Image (cartoon, helix red, strand yellow):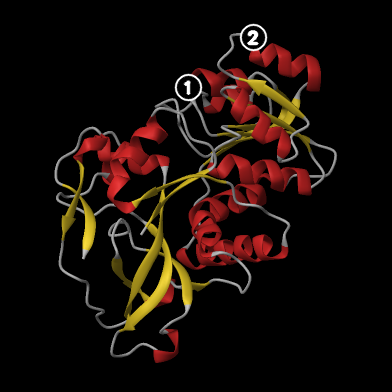
């Protein structure tokens, strides 16, 4: 089968199409014929050799990709045969997703609800559970003001919608007019271009202090956002698109009664439950995944380059 192989860390061009052996399902496994593979920003950092944490650096060579959607093509000897032919999304356990087929644990399978497109389900697999976990942790109340950074990204576009659905006033921060227009379309009440020097001052003039921040950028942007937070507010980190987390000390937060939520650890079982919630919300029409761009499997390098150039909006998928 065809797959994308990373043999050494470096630029996107290190993602090379190759022929690799077809996977065979072992005990407790199934093989999924992949139709769409998710790409995350973290995967671009891992590929470059600069993961958010050293423990995330894999042993090479590897077929990247941690989330796929497709149809179950074969099952292992101890797996319910009725899975065969069903539309599913699933984690791969950390690798193997950028391929025509992948062997995964049967217990990780999530069946796609009827009426929901497989591409939409794939877009929601990781980003949907992340956004819902953040919303649960932040415990937003109707009438609060919520600032979403990286509001035009895969997670950010979902947070904008979820915060709006919760009755919050939503401030969306993103880079450039195209991304701001998307955030406004999704329901943001105020939009701000964080590539401008005075973006935080403009937010304060239009929305005042905010109750909750979802920080997907970090660095100087995250630090400026922290200054907008009301005393007693909640600051939730979910990404570091700038290359570093915002340097906010526990002491600075405590002095203002601010709760810092640096990541939301969840068990594998809860992760599956959160993903199912996201798929059900999309199937019912209350949550819309934004697939901003797709690339053929063979163009995985182009997909990574587009994400790194900040040229993408919403979710980026590889199509097989």
Q: Which residue is mark 2?
A: 198
Q: Is residue 234 left or right of residue 261?
A: right
| Mark 2 Cα-neighbour bin, 10 Å: few <14, some 14–19, many ≥20 | few
Provide residue 286's location: percent of width, then percent of height: 73, 57
Answer above or below: position of 207 versus 235.
above
Q: Is residue 232 visible?
A: yes
14 and 247: which is toward the camera: 14
- For residue 219, which numbered disc appears in the image? 1
At x 79%, y 14%, the residue is 205
Q: Secondary structure at mark 1?
A: helix
Provide residue 127's location: percent of width, then percent of height: 53, 50
Provide residue 118's location: percent of width, then percent of height: 51, 64
Answer above or below: position of 278 versus 141.
below
Q: Which residue is outermost to the top?
A: 197
| Mark 1 Cα-neighbour bin, 10 Å: few <14, some 14–19, many ≥20 | some
At x 53%, y 48%, the residue is 264
Q: State the separation of the CA atoms marked 2 and 1.
A: 16 Å
131 and 139: which is toward the camera: 131
At x 83%, y 44%, the residue is 142
Q: Which residue is outermost to the right?
A: 143
């Amino acid at each position: 089968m065809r797959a994308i192989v990373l043999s050494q860390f470096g630029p996107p061009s290190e993602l090379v199409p190759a022929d690799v052996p077809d996977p065979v399902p072992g005990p407790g496994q199934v093989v999924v014929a992949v139709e769409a593979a998710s790409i995350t920003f973290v995967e671009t950092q891992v590929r470059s050799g600069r993961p958010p944490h050293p423990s995330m650096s894999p042993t090479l060579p590897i077929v990247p990709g941690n989330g796929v959607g497709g149809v179950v093509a074969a099952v292992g000897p101890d797996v319910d045969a009725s899975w065969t032919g069903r539309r599913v999304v699933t984690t791969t356990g950390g690798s193997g997703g950028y391929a025509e087929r992948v062997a995964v644990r049967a217990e990780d399978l999530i069946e796609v609800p009827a009426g929901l497109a497989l591409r939409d389900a794939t877009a929601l697999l990781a980003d949907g559970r992340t956004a819902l976990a953040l919303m649960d942790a932040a415990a937003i109340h109707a009438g609060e003001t919520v600032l979403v950074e990286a509001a035009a990204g895969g997670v950010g576009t979902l947070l904008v919608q979820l915060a709006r659905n919760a009755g919050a006033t939503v401030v969306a921060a993103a880079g450039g007019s195209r991304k701001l227009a998307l955030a406004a379309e999704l329901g943001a009440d105020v939009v701000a271009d964080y590539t401008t020097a005075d973006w935080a001052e403009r937010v304060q003039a239009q929305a005042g202090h905010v109750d909750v921040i979802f920080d997907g950028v970090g660095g100087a942007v995250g630090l400026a956002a922290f200054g907008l937070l009301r005393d007693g507010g909640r600051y939730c980190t979910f990404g570091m698109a700038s290359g570093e987390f915002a340097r906010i000390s526990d002491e600075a937060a405590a002095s203002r009664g601010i709760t810092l939520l640096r990541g939301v650890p969840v068990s594998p079982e809860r992760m599956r439950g959160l993903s199912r919630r996201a798929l059900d919300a999309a199937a019912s029409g209350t949550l819309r995944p934004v697939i901003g761009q797709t690339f053929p499997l063979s163009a995985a390098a182009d997909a990574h380059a587009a994400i790194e150039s900040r040229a993408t909006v919403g979710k980026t998928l590889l199509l097989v």
